[in-house]
Amino acid sequence: MKISLEQHLRDYAASFYNGQPENDRNIRLKIDHTFRVRDEARRIAAAELPDPAERSLAERAALLHDLSRFEQFARFGTFKDAASFDHGDRSAELAAEQHLLDNLDEAAQADVLDAIRSHNKLAIPGTLSERGTVLAQVVRDADKIDIMPILFDYLKHPTNKSVVLNLAASPEITPAVWDDLAAQRTPPHAELRTVADFVSAKLNWVYDLNYPTSRRIFRERGYLETLKDFLPHTQQVETLYRAASARLAQ
């Protein structure tokens, strides 16, 4: 009997449980995240994409966007791509290797794989097709939206440092990160040194939200305000917050 893609993902994730609490909670973290990103992508696509076929592809890409995270943590004990592998690229490889897109035509397969590869990059490559770009935009927005509550839970109960890539628990924002933030750029992960770097970088995610629906969700859930509460109470942070708030209002 053929199983659903959702059940395949649950079974695949479960194959990486090993009885070690640190490993198993992070495998659970990512499978739960996968299904919530699917739900957020479905919500964004329903509001922004008029084509039902395109909405279906966006949902498929969202389900597969983090397919490699289970292998990544089981092998390397981290979600840090620089210390393991690029999880967008590897997730696309696994989706193809596991034949999870075989019921799609070649063009649709290519677009979904491109969206998976692109979801974690600083910017969407200009080489994607028009539809591939749309799929990537939906997945990137959905991913950002769901990462917020995961981060906030860690900041309130800082027990799982894998959430913040094992960065130093410091309230300091480093100069290179400040430069990117002031220029309304998202700092690359390689620049991040402290938890404050990690949190402040999320303020600038608002400039990379692609759809009005995504910005509305971000705004209505109060994500910017919560991020600000976990950062140093300085004029610099206030300036960044006000600029990001203005962007969310658009």
Image (cartoon, rainbow, N blue to C red):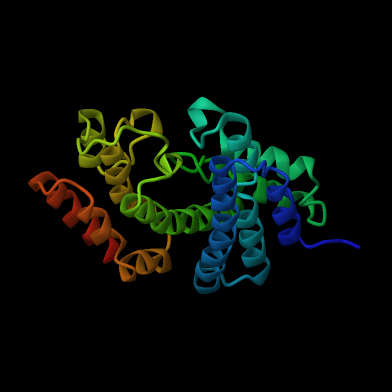
On the image, the x and y values in percent for residue 109 come to 73, 50
Query: Where's the N terminus, which quadrant?
Result: bottom right
The extreme left residue here reads 235
The extreme top residue here reads 83
Q: Residue at x 52, y 58 (%)?
A: 138
Instruction: Indicate left or right for 103 with 6 as reference.
Output: right
Query: Where's the C terminus, which quadrant?
Result: bottom left
Q: Residue at x 43, y 44 (%)?
A: 160
| Above or below, comparing residue 95 to residue 228 in the picture | above
Instruction: Indicate left or right for 88 with 168 as reference.
Output: right
On the image, the x and y values in percent for residue 215 come to 36, 64
On the image, the x and y values in percent for residue 21 come to 56, 44
Foreground residue among 67 and 108 = 67
| Above or below, comparing residue 176 to residue 105 in the picture | above
**How many labels, in total?**
0
Foreground residue among 247 and 75 = 75
Instruction: Indicate left or right for 166 with 104 as reference.
Output: left
On the image, the x and y values in percent for residue 51 come to 62, 70
Q: Residue at x 21, y 54 (%)?
A: 228
Instruction: Indicate left or right for 241 with 128 as reference.
Output: left
Foreground residue among 4 and 206 = 4
